[in-house]
Image (spheres, rainbow, N blue to C red):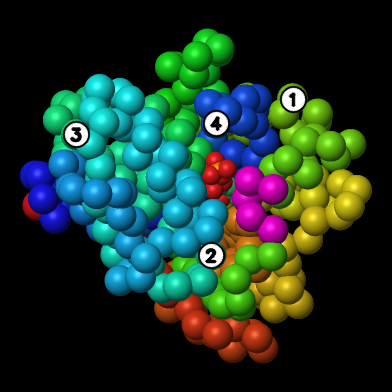
Amino acid sequence: MSGQAVTARSNVNVALVKYWGKRDTALNLPASGSISLTLDGLYIDATVAFGASGTDRFEIDGEPAAGEERERMASFLDLVRVRAGRADAVTVRTTSHVPRGVGLASSAAAFAALALAGSRAAGLALDATALSALARRGSGSACRSIFGGFVEWRRGELADGSDSVAEPLLAPDAWDVRVVVAVTSTAPKSVSSRVGMARAAASPLYPAWVAGADADLAEARAAIRARDLGALGEIAEHSALEMHAIGLAARPPLLYWRGATVECVHRVWQLRAEGVPGWVTIDAGPQVKVLCAPADVPRIAEALAAVPGVERVLACVPGQGAEVIG
Ligand code: DP6
């Protein structure tokens, strides 16, 4: 790579109060706020260098980027270029340390790492808030991965989106919780979040979802402040199930779950009834993520691994925000 290459690393995050719907697709502004937990150990490294000769080059995990992935990366780097007033070619390499196809929001980690590496390589010194606004343009959930621990992405009110940014609620070491992930399918997702959200907006349940968002956010914020896992789990489970209910009621319908997804939900509810507390959340795919206390990880992981159709189980701890590593 020519020019000064900058490498940044960003962890994935899992939403506890979901982002599901946009108020502006061009600026990627959400219909409502969301709250997430950044997860340690599942990350993407992005290396960016400007000043390369010839044309732009984009590489993902050692292969030239293609199709929609390339387009999204290219338009994101265009934003960085415009912001920095540059016109030179760029070379971008990303390396994924998120198991492929496990439905763990790798686009969030990718665009957070690209925002940090890209802006630095372009000569911009953006603060965390400006980085969050930039990352949002690549993928909404990426604006939360700029920060570690519990994070809130504010909906914002301004038409230009400048106030639609994430902010930290609680540092990763301030509350020791776990997220156990049951991978029920590694097949590529059939409907992207972007398309899923567009369909959701036409669901008869969508207005109720948007109307209830502020109350959900307030409840989650209060639970995090009080370190009340039961209260946070309850609102997280509700947010996820309501998000999926919107899809079921849409025409055409949208259902991300497989049989094993449903079985995992029942298993978690059964464990809870037996005194092992865990709460499910599910994103735009068939995997089930369970919020729980560290001491309950072995029993929850063991129970989920025994559900027919579960391919693997991983346990994650709270992680740091995006950082420059080279
Ligand atoms: C279900 O951030 O991937 O994971 O902004 O269109 O790139 P775009 O969508 P994306 O959507 C994430 C949806 C979700 C919920 C969440 O992370 O809040």
Circle 4 residue:
28
Circle 2 residue:
103
Give how far across and how far down residue 157 sits, in percent. Answer: 55, 13
Distance CA(mark 2)–CA(mark 4): 21 Å
Of badges 1 and 3, nearer the viewer stands 3
The amino acid marked with disc number 4 is: Asn
Q: Is mark 1 within 8 Å of ligand 1?
A: no
**Number of other residues with Cα within 10 Å of mark 3, as a class: few under 14, some 14 to 19, many 20 or more:** many
Q: Is 202 left, or right, of 187 in this rendering?
A: right
Dot 3 or dot 2, earlier in sequence: 2
Residue at 87%, 47% (x, y): give it: 250
Distance CA(mark 1)–CA(mark 3): 40 Å
Q: Does the residue labelled 4 lie within 8 Å of ligand 1?
A: yes
Dot 2 or dot 4, earlier in sequence: 4
User: Residue 67 got which mark?
Assistant: none
Of badges 1 and 2, nearer the viewer stands 2
Residue at 53%, 26% (x, y): give it: 27
Instruction: Check residue 45 for magenta coloring.
Output: no
Res 138 quadrant in image: top left
Of badges 3 and 2, nearer the viewer stands 3
Q: Is 181 left, or right, of 144 in this rendering?
A: right
Label 3: element kind = loop
Distance CA(mark 4)–CA(mark 3): 22 Å
Circle 3 residue:
122
Distance CA(mark 4)–CA(mark 1): 19 Å
Dot 4 or dot 1, earlier in sequence: 4
User: Is residue 167 in view from this perspective?
Assistant: no
Which residues are the magenta region? 191-195
